[in-house]
Amino acid sequence: MFGDLVQIKKQLISVISLCKERGLVHSEDAQDMDALGLAKSYFDLKEYDRAAYFLRGCSSQKAYFLYMYSRYLSGEKKKDDETVDSLGPLEKGQVRNEALRELRVELSKKHSAGELDGFTLYLYGVVLRKLDLLKEAVDVFVEATHALPLHWGAWLELCNLITNIDMLKSLSLPDCWIRDFFIAHMYTELQMIKEALQKYQSLIESGFSKSTYIVSQIAVAYHNIRDIDQALALFNELREQDPFRIENMDTFSNLLYVRSMKPELSYLAHNLVGIDKYRVETCCVIGNYYSLRSQHEKAALYFQRALKLNPRCLGAWTLMGHEYMEMKNTSAAIQAYRHAIEVNKRDYRAWYGLGQTYEILKMPFYCLYYYRKAHQLRPNDSRMLVALGESYEKLSQHVEAKKCYWRAYTVGDVERMALLKLAKLHEQLNESDDAAQCYIIYIQDIFSCGEQLEHAEVSTALRYLGQYYFKNKLYEEASLCAQRCCDYNDAREEGKALLRQISQVRDHMEASNTTPVRRVSPLDLSSFSP
Amino acid sequence: MASVHESLYFNPMMTNGVVHANVFGIKDWVTPYKISVLALLYEMTTSKPIALQERRRLNKLILPLQQGPDLTLDQFLKTVEECCPQTAYAVKLRLHEMADGELKDMEYFFATLPTPFSAIDSEAYKTSVVGLFMRHMLLAYNKLSFSQVYKLYKALQQYYHSHYSQPGDVQVGLPALAADDSDMDLTSTEDNVGERMEKEELDTAPLHESELSRGPLSQKQAEYFLARQAYLLKNDENKALKPSALQDELNNMLKFNPDFAEAHYLSYLNSMRVQDIFISTHSLLHYFDRLILSGSEGKSNGDEGYGRSLRYAALNLAALHCRFGHYQQADLALQEAIRIAQESNDHVCLQHCLSWLYTLEQMKGSDSSVLTEDSVKMAAHFCLPYLVSLGIQSLVQQGAVQGKTAHELMDALKDTDILHWKHSLSELIDISLAQTTSIWRMYGKSTMAQQQAQLLLNMNSLEQVNFGVQQNNTEAFAVALCHLAELHAEQGLYGAVSEVLKHLKEQFPPHTQHAKLWMLCDLKIQFDRAMNDGKYHLAEPHVTAIAALNKTEGLYRKAQVLKALNRTTEAYSILQRLQLYCEKTKYTEMIIRVMLVTAELHWESSGFATALPLLLQALALARQHHLQALASETILHLAFTQLMLGVPEQALGVLHEAMEPILAHGAVMDKGRALLLAARCQMAMAGTRSNGQKHAALGLAVQSLGEAAAYFSMLDCKERLRDVHYLQARLHHTLGQTPQRNKCAMLFRLLDQELQAPGAAVAILSFIQIL
């Protein structure tokens, strides 16, 4: 299918010119030539009514599209202007694009007559969506993709309307190479990262390896599954290929933030300001930069600026919520998170943030709901599970808490806290066997991952295990643990004390000579070095 | 990429795609409707010669017009016309001048309005209601920008012309005024205003819907809408919008103004109606998220307001889980609320928490009287009359179950009543009356119960603003009506019962919260009827339905059916289980009933002697708890047992003790049974006497039987009626009264054929032995 890359290129070039002629800036017949030229000029000057006026009698498809599109844009412009001059709350919300209804009537007539081309179908779809006729809109967009598969705008609109995988599967989409791009994009949107990565990989293999779009999408996908290293590497590569790119750079800055890479983030921020300082992405990057430097007021300011530039920018709301949290302004944080949720109900970070806010306010039961929501959206994210577990623990619902921690471990614990917490919970409940088991897995886990984690509490685990083995009379293992304990400052004294105890008991035991009962498999530490 | 179409121009007032209206901090805006009101006021101040009565009506109209939501011109003119046609015409003329003229006409109108600052002696003086309104309007008008003035004028033209475009739409009433006026009418001595209002109330509901679907609401309208719907949800659900329609409205409202937090709360209430835990939780939390914002923004209470809403958020969550029966969740949420309230020393909130705590304990079925008492004391200390009396009421309820004496309970209720009237807590007055009904009923005083129920139903509502609600559909009313239905059923007045139930069905449709009450009541009545008629196959399906609504009751009824079907072993095991359970939950009434049925089971196996201690125990229990009806029934059982054990003298003595209360308060069924039993005792005793005395005694028995037959025929209780006729025939035979004997024998034969029950003969044999 991808064999003919040359063909694809040709198609692309042609569609770009088609798009340009129709004024579709971001996506991409000889009769009526004069009128069209005049109207296009007016259109470019943003005098939409004027453009529409000169196009009203034209019959060619291109002119018709421009005619309708001017009318649509004129309506939108007026709507935006009107809102400033509204007559108070009675009118609030009544301000709507008056042209939409007329457009819909005309377009639907033409649509049923089958006179619409790909672009007009796309416009019809947009009108329907604006009128909240979502079901019809989906149908029309699908039709538009069939009529003109290479118009990415229609695909993107479709993407916004698809809410779940079943809906995606039920659509009959045109069989074209661009479809794979769409499917991959959809998978990313629906958080089906693995499938998305596969799709993108196959696209790269079939010849799109130089596409910065694909690289950036893969990087975003890695970011979503929190594979930070991969994502960082890809973003760096992307910046080399396309140094003046601003798109997706907010995601990049998030990654740098998570890794606390101050100099890189600073460099990125300065670089982006140099390119264009009034871009949402730039503002987000700067916000992240200030946040990393703990200048939270400034960070919040920049996120606010990002929101002014685009009020529907989801990430900025959430990030602003985080900043307010840092500033201990919980009510403002709640507001910001709520806004984020309003923009997109499926934003798990906002739900998680709300949960955290209430947790800070010491309302563990209350925050359960929010964590649950977040967990629903990201069932395989350990952070929500750990947060849920902690809340349950605070409510002394131990069974649920244990389940959460264990599940968090099994789905791949990012912060490696779940097992430790589980072990401590078992310890509290005097379930020493389970606790020891958890500590063993925890230690193995920590050592096997190789890197040094700041909050790692290996010493706690070792200390407990030492005592545990000692109690169960497994002196070999106990002394091994005690020796390891001595490697850590906070556990050194206890380790030494335990060693002394062990040697005492051993001396005593040699006299009596009893065999210990083995209940738990001994910890095999020989292969790991702390 | 695709965001080209979203927002071409950055708009400073837009956040989130929605315009924030209150940017200028003005709540009042000039609208075409307001201009009409201004025109009316202008006419009223300038043209003096209006008849006194008309002027009075107009004056009464001013406030509702000013404060109510916007009306269409039709509605507005119609309202004014009803008060004073002359003025209405003048207003219309003035509007016509403006709408059909030019922009300058409107400007001129505003210029000529009497300025509240100059007109000292007129009604429009600056401190008067009218003056204040005019000042608001003038201020708002002067603040309008150039294009806004033009838009206002356009809107006015449209407003005026829409009046003519659809002249057929005259029959619509006026929504706000109907309500507002009717409570102003209290002072009115005028003609037929009341009737007029009533007629218009009928139109209210459809009008509201049509009005709402028209478009977004102003702040005031929205507030009014929410307040009204919330009130209706609480007091009379049927008059509120349908759940789905209401939800649509709320969604619509929230779409245009997502910050309107109250709408979320209403959505919470609304989804509670349809038992939708998902949306209700979501809305509740959303509401409090929003409230926390507004609380913190308010300067007056600052941090305090913020923390406060947190506490109440947790408390409300507890209430929600409680409503859905998630007691563990409710408990956790409540603990959280209590902890936060304690941390911030909020005693009032703590008090609310405490009252929820005992409610929760009660719902879980554990004893919470200590908690309740504490709650009452503390609430009294903090001057929270509502909570005090709620606590007392719940104490009374517990006390009644646990067998406190009647005078204590009644005293407590009287005290709460004083509290209610002092603070006009009408809701609690209703509850108190319903509770009294229940208590009287429990004690077996049917007349008193009936009287209290009627009192509640006939009482006028005390609510200050009632939106034409005559009778609320709160739980109290449901309880009272159910009692009434059952009381009528006891008297065999099944026509009345079905009337009451029909009313209940209308008032509390099946999906509503309190519908279970009447469903259970209905099922119980049907079950009892079927059992009395001996149609056990009809009673059996009811058992399943009853069990679904009330497990204990269901088990009890199941045992009854099994007993009637002679499946003794099964019945016995169920009864044992039930008794254990009831003893655990201290459900005395049920314990006694179970004992009675168990005793009946013993009879079946002729274990009369074994039944005796059980019955005595039941009697003691009933007397201890002052349950007169049950005590009388126990005595009946006891007497029968004694009769069977061959001591009719004793039986008759015992029976006489119960006869009086049964005849005074008992159900028709019980009356019949008592008389039948008395007759049988008399017959048994007559057997031992000499001839002359025997005749007299038998005569007495015949008389008793006649009365019993009358009662049984009232209930159409054929099986017992047959027995009675049989006994009558035998007695007449003994007395040598042949024609009567033949008549009774014929009646017996007819009934016996009708019943065709092979088992019946066995029962009769036992009587023959006695005779």
Image (spheres, grey):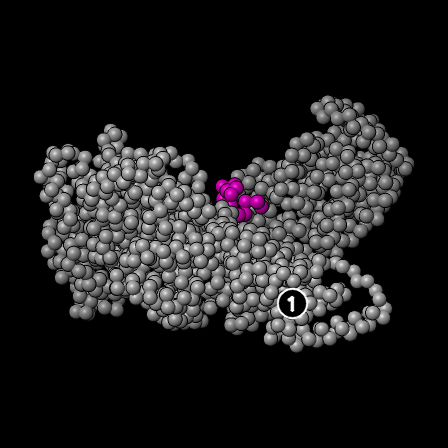
- Report the residue marked by disc 1: A462
Tell me which residue sits at (35%, 42%) in the image: A207
Picture coordinates of residue B577, whole percent (x, y): 75, 46
> Circle 1 sits in a helix, a strand or a loop, which is it?
helix
Q: Which residues are magenta?
A: B505-517
Q: Is residue B404 left or right of residue B251?
A: right
Based on the displayed image, in which of its 4 quarters is residue A318 positioned? bottom left
Res. B399 image quadrant: bottom right
Location of residue A105 (image quadrant): top left
Residue A482 sits above or below residue A384 on the image: below
Lateral position of residue A89 relative to residue A218, left or right? left
Tell me, yes or no, whether the highlighted magenta stretch contains residue B516: yes
Q: Percent x, y for residue B26?
A: 27, 63
Mark 1 is on which residue type?
Leu
Q: Is residue B275 magenta?
A: no
- The quarter of the image holding the C terminus of chain B is top right
| Residue at 51 percent of width and 51 percent of height | A379
Residue at the image position 55 percent from the left and 52 percent from the top: A411
In the rendered image of this protein, does residue B393 appear above or below residue A183? Answer: below
Q: What residue do we see at 72% from left, 39% from top?
A: B560
A114 and B142: which is toward the camera:
A114
**Which chain letter matches label 1?**
A
Residue B684: horizontal and vertical position, in percent? 85, 37
Q: Nearer the viewer, residue B105 or B308?
A: B308
